[in-house]
Image (tube, coloured by chain):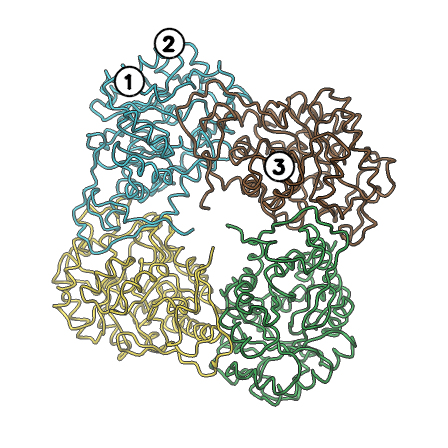
Chain colours: A brown, B green, C yellow, D cyan
Amino acid sequence: MSMVCLSDFEAYARKYLPKIAWDYFAAGADDCTTRDENILAYKRIRFRPRMLRDVSVMDIRTKILGSEISFPVGIAPTGFHQLAWPDGEKSTARAARAMDTCYIASTYSTCTLEEISAAAPGGLRWFQLYIHRNRAASQQLVRRAEALGFQGLVLTADLPYTGKRRDDVRNGFRLPPHMKVKNLEGAFEVCKMSLTFHSLRWHVPHERKTTGLDPSVTWNDIYWLRSLTRLPIIIKGILTREDAELAVKHGVQGIIVSNHGGRQLDEGPATIDALVEVVEAVRGRAEVYVDGGIRKGSDVLKALALGAKCVFIGRPALWGLAYKGEEGLQDVLRILQDEFRLSMALAGCASVSEIGQHLVQFSRL
Amino acid sequence: MSMVCLSDFEAYARKYLPKIAWDYFAAGADDCTTRDENILAYKRIRFRPRMLRDVSVMDIRTKILGSEISFPVGIAPTGFHQLAWPDGEKSTARAARAMDTCYIASTYSTCTLEEISAAAPGGLRWFQLYIHRNRAASQQLVRRAEALGFQGLVLTADLPYTGKRRDDVRNGFRLPPHMKVKNLEGAFEVCKMSLTFHSLRWHVPHERKTTGLDPSVTWNDIYWLRSLTRLPIIIKGILTREDAELAVKHGVQGIIVSNHGGRQLDEGPATIDALVEVVEAVRGRAEVYVDGGIRKGSDVLKALALGAKCVFIGRPALWGLAYKGEEGLQDVLRILQDEFRLSMALAGCASVSEIGQHLVQFSRL
Amino acid sequence: MSMVCLSDFEAYARKYLPKIAWDYFAAGADDCTTRDENILAYKRIRFRPRMLRDVSVMDIRTKILGSEISFPVGIAPTGFHQLAWPDGEKSTARAARAMDTCYIASTYSTCTLEEISAAAPGGLRWFQLYIHRNRAASQQLVRRAEALGFQGLVLTADLPYTGKRRDDVRNGFRLPPHMKVKNLEGAFEVCKMSLTFHSLRWHVPHERKTTGLDPSVTWNDIYWLRSLTRLPIIIKGILTREDAELAVKHGVQGIIVSNHGGRQLDEGPATIDALVEVVEAVRGRAEVYVDGGIRKGSDVLKALALGAKCVFIGRPALWGLAYKGEEGLQDVLRILQDEFRLSMALAGCASVSEIGQHLVQFSRL
Amino acid sequence: MSMVCLSDFEAYARKYLPKIAWDYFAAGADDCTTRDENILAYKRIRFRPRMLRDVSVMDIRTKILGSEISFPVGIAPTGFHQLAWPDGEKSTARAARAMDTCYIASTYSTCTLEEISAAAPGGLRWFQLYIHRNRAASQQLVRRAEALGFQGLVLTADLPYTGKRRDDVRNGFRLPPHMKVKNLEGAFEVCKMSLTFHSLRWHVPHERKTTGLDPSVTWNDIYWLRSLTRLPIIIKGILTREDAELAVKHGVQGIIVSNHGGRQLDEGPATIDALVEVVEAVRGRAEVYVDGGIRKGSDVLKALALGAKCVFIGRPALWGLAYKGEEGLQDVLRILQDEFRLSMALAGCASVSEIGQHLVQFSRL
């Protein structure tokens, strides 16, 4: 099997992962419209490539919140990496460090933050946080992450309850017995519940006892988080100019335009479409990133042209892991890197700083 | 078979109903364009979900014409429920009451109004009326409904003649001998004709003798209806601002934006598209509801965001009946309820009163 | 086989006609884009149906150039009816008379004008004319038609050369030996050539010797035609406001908006789209008709709503002939008539005079 | 097999060419979106055909940079014609001369410029140039071309690096041992590298050693080219008004709007869409041509209506070669010529000078 582009890794993962794991990673909410729109929306954006520029020396490095990365693609937070590869998040951390980019470790990792740190010392990592009803547990996670050298705190804002992913309900998805959400282990009893999904009604918001996450979180909790840590706070899951404005007002350093890979509210906007209005509202007062639907280096170029400072990949990283663990994820990142560099050159940009909105237009279709 | 979403019930019904019954329920007029557009039009509406709102306590109750229901989804009037389940409309009535919502019983029920009432005493029910050439028969129906405690009178405005549903013509659709349109039995001879469909020309409006319905009904007949009953009058089948204005002017209390499930004039507007202009024209002078194309809880949220007070489901209710009678219909309603609540939460609304047009936008596609 | 709608007749004809005949009738130019667009364009038009109008008495009669017809659907000129049914145009004439509508007989009929007249005395008929290099031959045809009681002269304007219909080239289409273009027989030698199609280059305009039609015809030839006959002149094949204006200026009585069933220049406008601009340009100074893509009674209603006085059907008439000759064509017309009447009623119109542009809107899609 | 239209030749080539050759010719970059859009974009343009014009005498000749050609279709530069037919570019040159049109010979020919010239003395030919790191080599090529009577110099501007064509990577595409890029043979060592593609990373711009082309070329190099030759300079690969303006400013005589057949940056504009803005920017100060997506004579007519002076065909020429070498390419050109003449006539134009923007409109779809 020749691994030429990201869809080759997708095909591999679909073929070799256990169905229940593939389904979990692939799942979108309801009709999966938003999951698929994330990809389709990129195709509606057309380049306006410029010719005869000197692109003999290409510089694709960039900085996010002051840290340099080798190219503007990081690893989005996704859960349960052991479902894709035995070493789980340790492999992810190693691949990200090898490729000199940022890895956002999920609360729902199957390795502890300590294991992740030990696996790839010195790598640039951010920690993704859900706020639990048990605030002490969340506080403890934040402090562990900061102590371990994580350099950013990513608050996921779009999951007061879990979206309805039909295949997970059909499969009765749960982690295999030998995997655990290790970061939460022992920390609080209630959260075991949140990882056990029951039949038809598992997704129902009014059955409060089944989830450890706190659906009462509001913008004021940003202040609470701020009081816990000196780390920059990045908010993930923003899709409107109104919320972008609120995020800036509450002092976040970064915003990840995200719809959770189309796994939460179906039929919201594609992230690349939402990016435009968020960037416009933020007016440079915070860094804006985007995830969802990135499948080619040219998608990265489009996102940057529309104002993203960096993109994050979710499922493609898992496909890379499923292919060959750390090495497979490096392959995925390297392909994206090569494609991004080539797209830049063919569009007439020799460095990231030359990328701008003049490079793209929305197709009439 | 795992019943996770409404299309699972559809698949069940398609598989287990007799073909002639499935075809009758599924039928759309002519090319079925409008039937299908009802669904597709929802997909062209995108949410603008808001984050970090306190959605820990969800309130999804609403009121229609002063009566509280558990969530803004009622049962639209459809005929011949015994084709789906032996107990027919009695099961429908029981399920609606169990789920604490409104059931609009059809003139073309296979149980009498009396049987329906007795099956679920105390349930909130409206009665759907066609005006017959024999006005005395219609008058008698209205009085029976009022006496039995029905709380609203729904006048169907879009069926001066029956639409051309090709499969019904091909199948020579008629009720099996053991089923009857009981509400009309004995009341007038002519209406037997209306339920016997003949070959090619059954749908032809100029063959007056074949139908008991009165194609000469006009807006003035609203006054006649008003003279018969103190029940609120809801008009069903309005698709334009002009007719919405006329409905208000003639004093109706409610309007159901409907195209009869795409079974009458093909290639009219999808109901969710028509809703916008009707709501705008009505300017709060009557309650506006919508039916057609509701397949997910998020569709309900979209309809409410665009100004509907409540939606009504037609075919999905029949699929529920076909699955397990009263219990199956409850399953359908419960799934919609759970999905609606979850969609609200994920869009950032804790109560129905927070739903508004800011939540949606029409897609460029 | 149950004949419920026009596509049933299409399916029949595709199945039972010889392939070479089916292909000839079905053919569109080049990629057949315009042929198919003629149909698709109707689907982009949405009705705005009005409710509660008295539609108990329906009047669907109309007049074209002063002659009353039973409903606004006539038979467009198409060639070689014997390919569809042994009696050819004689059956067509009988069916049109039986249904009390207008039949436009083609120059390329396989019966003579005399045979057509004799088959259905008293029927309303127009004669379709191509202008030949041999003007005397054309003049003779006009005079024969007028003498035989044809009541209109339809000049086809869009065939200076024959369009490139790939299947006809592949099939080496020619009439079977026992069929003849009888109207032209003996009249002039050159025209035999025009009916013999050779291999690859048959369609090439610069090979003048292969066609009897005159590609040098201009608007001034309308004056010449006018000098030959007192019959009203209808011009067929107009697609732009500019040409509509010229047609009116040159004194035609009627315009048929037509793209020759998509058989001439591919990728011109669908006729229903072109109708709008032609009607606007004509401003009532001539009657405007349309052909192409009519497949349902509601298509007729749309065409009338957009300003057509009458529509003409081409291929559906041939399918009817292929099904059962005169009787089959009557079936087709009767279905269209019933569907048209029903559509009118369901849209809230009791007579043709109530049909107007308010009934339709162009879909956003 | 009946060769009626260009897709017949495509089907033939797909069937009979070795897979690696077919894939190489067919390849588009990445998802092949732009390659396919080149074709689809033509379908979104609708004609506004005019009737009753005298089209008895058709004149389809035109001039490009002062040289008359038999119709406005030339042969675009494509590489490796021996992959399609043993005689390679010699056959191409002969066919172009036979059809009295212009052939742009590629740097990457498998025959030398001298062989090409000798094969068809007196034919109108331009030479396509890539600028190599080894400027002396490029200079030598220009001088050879000029000496051999080539009448134009086409600088390809859109290939600082080769686009990522997945199938070529998968196939490990390279020329068979018996074929050579003869024009470059011996001229410089480094360019052998550029024709040997290695595994996954062959396309990576920063691996400079693998390509002989110079990615540092800028607009100033036009002045350098100008200093080498008196031939008119045509720049190929322009897609924006900004670059069109720069091209004019740097004194080019012609611009070919091209996206390299969708083989370079995927998801740029279709060439026919880009043509409009380029023509507008150029305002007649240079001739504008277009390639990509031409499949029918009517596509040529559309391109001319939108301002192109001439179009060039790439893949269809290769299909013609693959079919029957020189003779097959003549067939392709003759079909295009016949179709173009017929389209003009059916649109109401008797000569190229009558073609204008009034003939087309962009479809709403």
Above or below, D299 relative to D111: below
Residue drawn at 37 percent across, 44 percent down:
D42
Considering the numbered disc 3 on the image, is that residue within a helix, a strand or a loop?
A: strand
- In the picture provided, is C177 more to the left or to the right than C333? left
Q: CA distance from mark 2 to mark 1?
A: 16 Å
Residue found farthest to the bottom: B136
Q: Amino acid at mark 1?
A: Glu
Q: Is any atom of residue A224 visible in this view?
A: yes
Question: Any mark on residue D115, and which?
Answer: 1
Q: Quadrant of residue A187?
A: top right
Pointers 3 and 2 in contact (C-beta within 8 Å): no
Question: Any mark on residue A291, and which?
Answer: 3
Q: Earlier in the sequence, mark 2 or mark 1?
A: 1
Q: CA distance from mark 1 to mark 3?
A: 54 Å
Position in image of residue A130 (x %, y %): 75, 39
Pointers 2 and 1 in contact (C-beta within 8 Å): no
Position in image of residue D181 (x %, y %): 38, 17
Q: Quadrant of the N terminus of chain D?
A: top left
Position in image of residue A197 (x %, y %): 79, 46
Q: Nearer the viewer, residue D74 or B92?
A: B92
Looking at the rendered structure, whether the residues under marks 1 and 3 are on a common chain is answered as: no
Position in image of residue D176 (x %, y %): 44, 19
Q: Amino acid at mark 3?
A: Asp
Q: Nearer the viewer, residue D247 or D93?
A: D247
The numbered mark 1 sits on a residue in which chain? Answer: D
- In the picture provided, is A178 more to the left or to the right than A255? right
